[in-house]
Structure formats: C-alpha cells, structure tokens
Image (cartoon, rainbow, N blue to C red):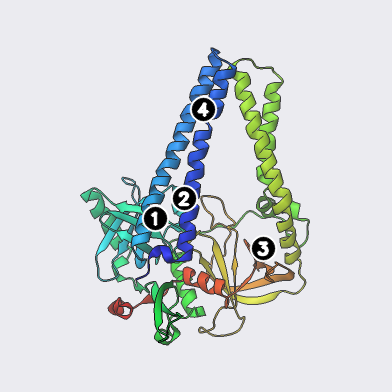
C-alpha cells in the first residue's frame, strides 16, 4: 500500500508544519541577540537587568515552543513515511477534565479509539469533525499518530488518552452522538498506474499512488448530487449553535466600499487603526519624557507599533483595497444569476463553501461551481451572518473581472445581503473542484459493506 507521505497534499502540509516550527524556534533564539546587546550597551543599569531577563525568558519560551513543534514534525514524518492513510468516522469530544479529544471508529469493526489532540486550539478548531465528521488517520492508536481532514492537507498529532476513567468517559460521550451507527467512510484508494519501461518484453510495472476518487465503474451511487450534498449540509447544521442576524450595514451596491463595515474588515482597515492607536499611545507617552526602564519600554512599544503599522498598511494598499474593489464592482453587476445552493464547510480550514447548482432541476443534479466564503462572524462565532438554511436559492452577481487563470469574481447575495468571497468562483468539473468536493462531503459505504471493496 502507498505511504501516506506519497500524497502530495500531505507532503506539502508536513513541509509547512516543519518550516513553521523552524521559524518559531529561530525567532526565539533571535531574541537572545538584543538581550546581549542591552547587556553590552548598558552594563550595570537597573532597568537593563529587567529588560534582559524579560527578553531571555521570552526567547526561551518561544524557542521551546518551536522545538516542541519540531519534535512533533519528526514524529509525523516517521509515521507518515511508514504507514498509510485510513478514513474513519470521527466524533469530537470536549471534556472540561481533559484536553480536546477525538474518537475514531475502526473501519473494520465497532472498536473505538479515544485520542488526545496535541495542538493549539486555533489550529485544531477549524479541523474539528462535525456531527457526521470524517477524519483520516495514520499511526498506531496505542502509541500515537497523525490526524487529518479528508484529503490529508492539514496535520495534527494525536496520542492515546492515558487515564482509564477519562477514556471511558470520552468513549461514552462519543457513543452518545451515534458514532457506532454512522456509515463507514470510503477509504483512500490505492490505484495502479501502468508505467512502461524499456525492455525487450515490454513489461508493465504497477506504480501505486493514492487516489481520493473511486473508479466510476465500481461506485456510481456516491456522486456529488444535490440530494447527497444537501443531506450532508443538513447534518452539519444540526450541531451549529443558533444563528442571529448581523448588525445592519450599508449596502455595497449603493455606497462606496469604505462605508461598508464588513468590507472595511475584509480589507484590513481595522489592523491599520489598531497600529495607529498603538503609535499614538507611544507618542503621547514620549511627551512626558520618561526615564530609565520607562524609556526602554516606550522604545519597545514604539518599535512594535511602527512595525505593525508598516505591515498592516502595506497589506491594506497592496492586497486589501484591490480585493474589496473587485468585490464592490461584482456586487453592482446589473444582471443577477439565480442558482440553488448548498452551504458546506471545508474540513481542512473550516471555511464555508457555497456549492452552486442549476436554478431548476432535480435532486440528482451535479454542481456547477464552488465559491469559498469569508466567515462573516466573529473569531469565536464565525458562522454568525451565514444563511440559517444550509440549502436554498442564491443570487450571484459578478463575472466582470477574472483571475489570470480565467476564474471569475462572483459575490452571492442572500435576502438582500452580500457575503464576501474568499476566492474566485471555481468550476466544479475541474481537478481542484473535484478535490474540494471530495473534502466537503466524503463518500460513505453502508456498514455491512465496509472494508470488503477495498481489500
């Protein structure tokens, strides 16, 4: 069987994780340089000792976090290089007496594997499996391994829950969610490719690779039809807390973009304002002419404020404003296009994705396009402002501007409100669209058929 690391998405995700760990570790070590500089510039000063201690402590903390991530990256590489991906029905369990946990059901039976997630909450939260979630696993459930959303494009290390009572409690809660009654996901396939080599007998050599799509002749019932995706969206919406309407804001179709609150946030104007406030505070504090340690702290605050202002202003001018101008131009398009929609969430990063279908048709229609959306809510409640119904009719406007690849910029409107896209409108029939659909709604088999078709 092909190794999990042979999947390009997995290899890229592991490289990103490794680079991030190395960057954090290097950044922590770099903090020792200014500490040494302060010791040389101001030896014996009382404020210098406090500043050196703070820089060294911060450097040790950051470098330690980076070193821990680097060790996990090495473990991930060993596990992914020696094992294969397997797909499991999964349930997330949040226990106040333990850390975040995920319970996987064995694809070959009813065995449940309680695993403790080893990751920061901001990394794990977008990948948390939903009410009918599926997770990929590579490793030994008794020792630890790698968890990933379908597709293998984001990696998290997990280890077995240590204490017996905690395992029992977590398994009971997962069983209460109906994990044992869920359908078995289709396993990542190993498909042979014929590679011809120079030989007098013209011998064909089989080269294995991982495929996310079953051969059409072996499975024609798992197509991404409107009925199947709508059912999946309905199950996703069950566990989502109740939504409420967003605060009213100006209509981007009638006013300039800078008068629309959500477009200002999308452009990054808020970050520029925070940086300006920080610089203003530093300037105001400088007016009282502090001395000693106060002067050094003020200097550090000013440096941080100026750096934040430069970065946020550059992002606003080069990326934020051009993007929101395209959105504002699209939402003013005079000809709306009606489509049916299904609202799903990408398990790889939690981004809502609008799947568009023909305006008229039946339950067996296939999708026309996919549009990733920027979460309209807050950091803790990103779903606020999304349509309360995961299926319905949407008005699409745009098709005036295109990317270099020919993909159009489109803005959806629900009940007169616009939701801003996180990228261009992608055709569902392309390779990227098919891979995204495979992640959005992984295929499942009946329990009685689990495992037999993939031996």
The mark nearer the N terminus, 2 or 1, is 2
Report how far apart the C-alphas of labels 2 and 4 lie in the structure: 25 Å
Q: Position of residue 327 (x, y in %)?
A: 71, 62
Q: Position of residue 326 (x, y in %)?
A: 73, 61
The mark nearer the N terminus, 2 or 3, is 2
Report how far apart the C-alphas of labels 4 and 1 lie in the structure: 33 Å
Q: Position of residue 350 (x, y in %)?
A: 50, 59
The mark nearer the N terminus, 4 or 3, is 4
Q: Is label 4 in contact with label 3 (beta carbons under 8 Å)?
A: no
The mark nearer the N terminus, 4 or 1, is 4
Report how far apart the C-alphas of labels 2 and 1 lie in the structure: 10 Å
Q: Secondary structure at mark 3?
A: strand
**Marking on residue 18:** 2
Q: Nearer the viewer, mark 4 or mark 1?
A: 1
Q: Is label 2 in contact with label 4 (beta carbons under 8 Å)?
A: no
Task: Check the picture and name the quadrant holding the C terminus.
Answer: bottom left
Q: Nearer the viewer, mark 3 or mark 1?
A: 1
Q: Nearer the viewer, mark 4 or mark 3?
A: 4
Name the residue carrying label 4.
Answer: 55
Name the residue carrying label 1.
Answer: 77
Q: Quadrant of residue 399?
A: bottom right
**Quick one: 386 or 167, which is closer to the camera?**
167
Query: Which residue shows up at 48% across the image and 63% down it?
Result: 9
Q: Is residue 280 above or below residue 189?
A: above
Task: Bin the neighbour count of mark 1 within 10 Å (Cα to Cα): few under 14, some 14-19, many 20 and up.
Answer: some
Q: Secondary structure at mark 1?
A: helix
**Marking on residue 418:** 3
């Amino acid at each position: 069987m092909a190794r999990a690391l042979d999947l390009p998405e997995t290899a890229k995700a592991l490289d990103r994780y490794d680079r991030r760990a190395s960057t954090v570790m290097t950044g922590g070590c770099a903090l020792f340089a200014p500490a040494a500089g302060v010791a040389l510039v101001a030896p014996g000063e009382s404020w210098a000792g406090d500043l050196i201690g703070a820089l060294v402590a911060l450097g040790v903390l950051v470098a330690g976090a980076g070193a821990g991530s680097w060790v996990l990256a090495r473990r991930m590489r060993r596990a992914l290089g020696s094992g294969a991906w397997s797909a499991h029905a999964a349930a997330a369990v949040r226990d106040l007496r333990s850390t975040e946990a995920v319970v996987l059901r064995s694809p070959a039976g009813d065995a449940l594997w309680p695993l403790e997630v080893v990751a920061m909450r901001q990394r794990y939260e977008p990948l948390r499996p939903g009410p009918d979630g599926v997770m990929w696993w590579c490793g030994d459930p008794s020792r630890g391994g790698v968890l990933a959303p379908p597709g293998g494009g984001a990696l998290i290390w997990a280890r077995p829950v240590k204490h017996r009572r905690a395992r029992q409690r977590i398994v009971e809660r997962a069983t209460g969610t109906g994990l044992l009654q869920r359908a078995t996901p289709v396993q990542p396939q190993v498909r042979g490719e014929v590679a011809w080599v120079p030989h007098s007998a013209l011998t064909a050599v089989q080269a294995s690779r991982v495929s996310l799509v079953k051969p059409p002749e072996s499975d024609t019932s798992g197509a991404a039809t409107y009925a199947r995706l709508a059912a999946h969206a309905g199950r996703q919406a069950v566990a989502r807390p109740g939504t409420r309407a967003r605060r009213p804001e100006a209509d981007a179709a009638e006013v300039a973009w800078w008068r629309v609150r959500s477009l200002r946030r999308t452009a990054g104007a808020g970050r520029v304002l925070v940086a300006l406030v920080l610089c203003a505070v530093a300037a105001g504090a400088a007016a009282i002419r502090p001395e000693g340690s106060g002067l050094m702290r003020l200097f550090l605050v000013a440096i941080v404020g100026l750096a934040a202002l430069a970065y946020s202003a550059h992002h606003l001018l080069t990326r934020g404003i051009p993007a929101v101008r395209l959105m504002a131009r699209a939402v003013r398009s005079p000809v709306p296009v009606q489509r049916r929609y299904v609202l799903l969430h990408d398990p790889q990063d939690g981004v809502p994705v609008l799947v568009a279908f023909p305006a008229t048709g039946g339950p067996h229609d296939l999708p026309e396009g996919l549009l990733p959306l920027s979460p309209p809510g807050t950091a803790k409640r990103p779903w606020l402002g999304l349509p309360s119904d995961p299926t319905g009719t949407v008005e699409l406007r745009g098709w005036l501007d295109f990317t270099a690849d020919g993909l159009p910029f489109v803005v959806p409107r629900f009940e007169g409100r616009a939701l801003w896209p996180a990228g261009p409108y992608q055709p569902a029939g392309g390779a990227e669209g098919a891979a995204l659909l495979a992640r959005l709604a992984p295929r499942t088999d009946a329990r009685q058929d689990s495992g037999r078709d993939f031996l």
